[in-house]
Amino acid sequence: MYRFSHYYLAGFINACVMACLIPVMSLYAYRYLGASSVQLSVLLGGYSLSSILYATVISRIVERLGGHKIWLLGTSLMASCAVLLLSTTQNYLFAALIMITLFAPFHASTSLLMGLAFRYFPEGQMTTVNARLMATISAAWVVCPSVAFYMTEHLGFNVFFYALGVVLILLALLFGYLPVSGSAIAIDLNSCAERHRQAYKAKSGDPAYPLTKKANGIMDYAYLWPPILLFTLLSFGINLYQHLLPVYFVEEGLPVSLVGGLFMSAAIVEISLIIRCPSLLSRFSYHQLFIVASLCGITFFMLLPVSQNTSYLFLLQILKAIMYGIMAGLGVNLLQRLLPSEPTFAAALYQNAFAMGMLLAGFATGVAVEFLPPQGLFSISAFVVMVCLMMLLLFRRAFIVAKAPDNIKG
């Protein structure tokens, strides 16, 4: 796998850019641009919605016309121009326009990279490849936010944006070095999709499975709605917890500095679990593993307010790590297996589901702080994950991935 290391290096650097920029955006808007609370919400919310739209549109174009590397190069260079422009202005409207129009397309780069890998690696390796690429994202979030805050605080936003622009140019060069295809690819994607459709052979009128050769409208993707909704709700619960944990620590009189340590410890465990997830598929199904993730999430959110003991809080992070590790380790792969003829679009759907959960969590944070007592702040996350568990029990067939028949090599 060493000869494929440039894929993982590209994924890691790509994740580092996001892990550096996103955490400091509110600080940048509030302190550097002098934005009001309303302007801050407009900037962050507008960027999230714009990035979701760009990722969807770009992935659809690439699935039909190809050109993964061209789009990876283009979005990286455009993002580099965006951060260099951000370093030269303190005008809020101009900065917001730059983020929404020039940097937001970079959000699609993760799904483009996964789509490119899907066409290069053998089908049997894709579960491991996806897990390792997702692990690079978690690894980037272990260190990069701290580096970003240090640079902006001690070196200034100008130096931070210049450094980010250089990294994006180097990333574009690395994207250009990635191979488009190779001898490893041994399947035709349309044949793969047809194999899945034939294997399902669901009841007439069952909305859980595709019946057409090529999806043309939103209803043709109805069989993907349950897993997409599941990932959106799980993302909502996780991100709401991350927003509320500092507030909970303040309300309970606990040291806020401990929050960073909890997040870092959870991320370290998550990385190892994400990498291990593919091996679990030899014993368990996607459906069973997501049930385990939901049960761990419910238990985590319910037990979190029980004690403020430091050792207890750190030990509890294992449950959160299991929930997120299974979601990140298997989420993209599940959607790509359910939509094998459009792997880039499938990766974009997962990415957008996670982004939508993040966006909704931002809106829900204020409501939770306003109306819930400290001990009840995490009840919303617990309830949302309970809904996820109910979905898994009610829509089991939507999480079944057909195995290849013996006469088809993959």
Image (tube, helix red, strand yellow):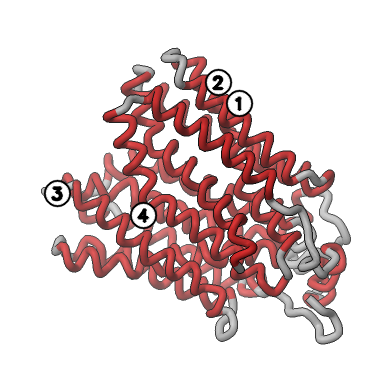
Which of pointers 4 and 2 lies earlier in the amino acid sequence?
2
Q: What element carries label 3?
A: loop
Q: Which residue does the numbered mark 2 point to in the structure image?
A: 97
Camera-side residue: 212 or 196? Answer: 196
Does residue 113 appear to the left or right of 28 in the view shown?
right
Q: Quadrant of the C terminus?
A: bottom right
Q: Which residue does the numbered mark 4 point to in the structure image?
A: 380
Task: Give amino acid for label 3.
Answer: Pro
Q: Which residue does the numbered mark 3 point to in the structure image?
A: 255
Residue at x 47% of width, y 58% of height:
234
Which of pointers 1 and 3 lies earlier in the amino acid sequence?
1
Q: Which residue does the numbered mark 1 point to in the structure image?
A: 101
- Percent across and percent down for residue 242 are 34, 50
Q: How far apart are marks 3 and 2 (CA)?
A: 37 Å
The quarter of the picture where residue 125 lies is: bottom right
- Percent across and percent down for residue 206 are 76, 69
Does residue 9 appear to the left or right of 321 in the view shown?
right
